[in-house]
Image: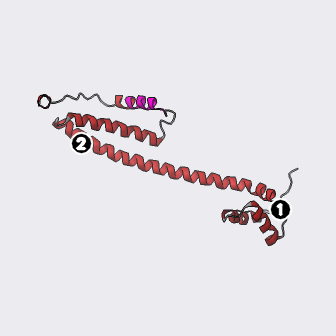
Amino acid sequence: MAKLSAIPENLIIPLMEKYEDGLNDTELSEWLLTEHGIEASRLAVQGRLKPFRDIAQQAKRDAITSRAGDRALDYVSMIDKDIAKLDKITDLLLQSKDDMPLAKSLMETKAKLLFKQIEFTGINKEEKDQSNQEDMLQRILAKFPKLEIVEDKDKKAG
């Protein structure tokens, strides 16, 4: 048979509020005695509030996780915009064939941004070490159409 707590249900919320205000379990025990005439040890207060503290802690963790997820989505969105800008610039360079090394460099930057995007979305959590990241980068690059970057012969000669 479960032992009934000396702390009534209607005092849980006020106790949690006092706890959130900074009172420790001993002070809460004293508060119960002076304000309500209830004699409860520090351990009794601790035991009675534990399930509610656990719920409050989980709610805080969930809020932090949610904010972190929102921030990651913001970063992914910023990366999307950067990738779109790189695409436009790279397309212009490839069409004009003015600066093929720069076009290649921009494509490598785009691949790195795509990798960052994958990192922020958590798709690649199991692949943490550098060699796995390099493998992943190569797999990403392999998905793009093969582009033959040919340097302008006139530029090479000069």
Residue 48, above or below 10: above
Residue 126, percent across and down? 52, 33
Q: Earlier in the sequence, mark 2 or mark 1?
A: 1
Residue under the image location 51 percent in, 53 percent down:
67
Q: For this view, does 52 lie left or right of residue 157?
A: right
The reply to whether the magenta stretch includes residue 135 is: yes
Give residue 89's mark: 2
Looking at the rendered structure, the kind of residue marked 1 is: Ala
Residue drawn at the location 85% of the way across and 65% of the way down: 39
* Picture layout, residue 129 above or below residue 82: above
Q: Amino acid at mark 2?
A: Ile
User: Most prominent secondary structure in the magenta stretch?
Assistant: helix
The dot on residue 40 is 1
Q: Which residues are magenta?
A: 128-138
Q: Secondary structure at mark 2?
A: helix
For the C terminus, the image quarter is top left
Quick one: label 1, few (<14), some, or many (20+) residues within 10 Å?
Answer: some
Residue that protrudes farthest toward the front in the picture: 158
Give the Cα distance between marks 2 and 1.
Answer: 72 Å
Q: Quadrant of residue 89?
A: top left
